[in-house]
Image (cartoon, grey):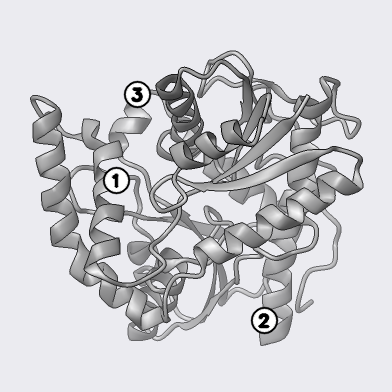
Amino acid sequence: MKTAVIALHFGEPRKATLEEVVPFLERIFLANANLEDLPDQAARERRSRELAERRAPSLIEEYEEIGGSPLNEQADAQGRALGLELLRRGHQVHVYSAFQFTHPLIPDVVKQARADGVERIVGLPVYPLCGPSTNVAALDGIQRALDDLEWTVEFGGVTGWHRHPAYIELRADAVRRLAEERGLDLRAPRTHLVFSAHGTPQKYLDEGSRYVEYVEEFCEEVARILGVDDYLLGYQNHSNRGIPWTQPDVEAVIRDVDGGAVLVEPVSFMHEQSETLAELDHELREEAEEVGLDFHRVPVPHDDPRFAGILADVLEPLLTGQDSTLGLQLAPCRCRPKAGTVCLNALPRERAAPAPEPVAGT
């Protein structure tokens, strides 16, 4: 059976122009149009256009400030690495990269897979923490594309995978490396570990999203492995629609830190993008320095050689139809209760082995 893995990413414009940025933003706002009470599709499209045109100039400034977004290139490299890892394990699959909001869009990639003679599709959102507008929406995008093509093909997918022990270690290692490079002691009273997670509208949480639970769980596990008892968590929220988002804002968290140094770990991201390179490295850094803090941001480990193996571990049970040989507890997803959709979050949480004692700087 000819199998395709579609690695699903957010995407960002490849050029910082109105011609690329406005349609990109329109797609995002339209995909989340249910956050506002609008009467019909035409109203939703008008509102999405209005929001996109309002936000585009400042976003273009961000892209120009960071020299363009590297997200898509990093995503493509991750797809190639995953394909090689699966081939090394004996799986003859083709890995496609698809983006929710920039080209190649999900429908285009699904159409290409049909043209390539694919007989089975496995969707893999490359978002560490499962949310309704990311992991769930990306898999829903594949299903809509299949429906639009009237293509009956075997389709399954993985939503949440942040509980993979090797992934938790990978993120902890990234924090350790930065601390060692900067000569910082993670246990020192004036060194503050700050987790920065992408925010989500409160409406999604009220409707049952477990995103905040996953964020808090993941931060707790990373901090435990690092041997850090006291850490902070803030959210990168967007106020385009003027609706409630997750709290506290990471800016407020930074302003409340009482001196010293902050190490900011962007836990929601597996790519560098405007929300790390601009929102954190520029805007949040300015907030920190204004209140006298020494600011350090942990690089996203997008090219860590272990990452392809982690994704392959999650995919293998779907490719083979057998339980994970690593003991990963994949089960039917509760966030996307559709046949063939599994995740690592569905079963009760199991804590990993106790953390080792050595910590950077001690």
Q: Residue at x 72, y 51 (%)?
A: 168
User: Which residue lies under the disc numbered 2?
Assistant: 184
Task: Mark 1 or mark 3: name the one nearer the start of the chain.
Answer: 1
Q: CA distance from mark 3 to mark 2?
A: 41 Å
Placement of 81 over or under 344, stated as above or below: below
Q: Which secondary structure, mark 3? A: loop
Task: Locate residue 38 relative to residue 104 in the image: left or right.
Answer: left
Q: Residue at x 44, y 19 (%)?
A: 147
Front-most of residues 174 and 183 = 174
Task: Give yes or no for contact between labels 2 and 1 (Cβ–Cβ under 8 Å).
Answer: no
User: Which residue lies under the disc numbered 1?
Assistant: 27
Task: Locate residue 164 relative to residue 8 in the image: left or right.
Answer: right
Looking at the rendered structure, which numbered label has been put on residue 124?
Answer: none
Determine if residue 354 is in view. no
- The image quadrant where one finds the N terminus is top right
What is the three-letter code of the residue carrying label 2? Answer: Leu
Which tag is nearer the camera, tag 2 or tag 1?
1
Task: Locate residue 179 relative to residue 206 in the image: left or right.
Answer: right
Front-most of residues 81 and 162 = 81
Determine if residue 358 is in view. yes
User: Which residue lies under the disc numbered 3?
Assistant: 207
Place of residue 298 in the rendered image (x, y in percent of width and height, measured from the top left): 59, 71
Placement of 85 over or under 22, stated as above or below: above
Task: Give yes or no for contact between labels 3 and 2 (Cβ–Cβ under 8 Å).
Answer: no
Place of residue 171 in the rendered image (x, y in percent of width and height, measured from the top left): 69, 59
What is the three-letter code of the residue carrying label 1? Answer: Arg
What is the three-letter code of the residue carrying label 3? Answer: Glu
